[in-house]
Image (cartoon, helix red, strand yellow):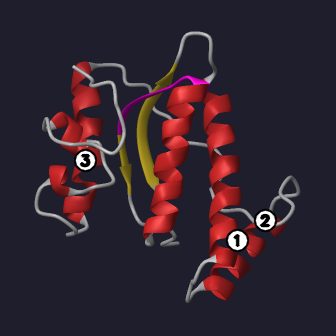
Amino acid sequence: MDIFTRPIYKHIIVDALRFCQEKKGLRLHAWCLMSNHLHLITSAADDKNLSDILRDFKQFTSRKIITAIQEEPESRKQWLLHRFEFAARQNPKVRHYKLWQDGNEAKELHSNAFLEQKLDYIHQNPVRAEWVNEPEHYRYSSASCYAGESKLLEIELLQ
């Protein structure tokens, strides 16, 4: 579903990524927030577990976004809450609302060529969606960092 369409929801994601970087050991190498999904190239600090960081990120952002849907003006409020409630009923571990899909589509970046392919794929998403003409013009992405321009989040550039 196109959930990340309003600035408030996007800012929740950006702020949570920043918090995970500063407090949980998330090493962010590339990212791109689309309207219905988030691409990340990440790793974890030596003493941290990436799966744990991503689990906590998903839990926190789910709660914050559901609260924002409930409290902020949202024309799709009832529809969104119903869809997230329905998704929660499909999983006995979830009590009220389920925003994120289970798991992550993790892929090991085993070569420089594969890494470059994934980095290009992530950054070209907004171009393919026809939101921008150049990847670095999309605000909610690390493409501007790789172009040497301003950024929303600090990242560790991949060489």
Q: Is residue 90 left or right of residue 128?
A: right
Which residue is under mark 1? 84
> Disc 2 and disc 1: Cα gap in Å?
6 Å
* Secondary structure state at the residue bearing disc 3: helix
> Disc 3 and disc 1: Cα gap in Å?
28 Å
Where is residue 63 shown, x and y percent of the image? 71, 58
Which residue type does callout 2 highlight? Answer: Ala
Tell me which corner region of the image, top left, top right, bottom left or bottom right, holds residue 117.
top left
Which residue is under mark 3? 123
Where is residue 28 shown, x and y percent of the image? 41, 31
Residue occupying image coordinates x 68% and y 87%: 78
In the picture, the disc for residue 26 is none
At label 2, counting other C-alpha atoms closer than 10 Å, the crowd grade (few under 14, some 14-19, many 20 or more) is some
Which residue type does callout 3 highlight? Answer: His
* Secondary structure state at the residue bearing disc 2: helix
Where is residue 45 shown, x and y percent of the image? 53, 16
In the picture, the disc for residue 88 is 2
Asked whether residue 70 appears in the rendered view, the answer is yes
Q: Is the magenta stretch mostly helix, strand or loop?
A: strand
Residue at the farthest top position: 46
Of 52 and 106, nearer the camera is 52
Question: Magenta segment range?
Answer: 24-30
Q: In this view, does 62 lie to the left or right of 146?
A: right
Above or below for 21 versus 5: above
Q: Are marks 3 and 2 in contact (CB under 8 Å)?
A: no
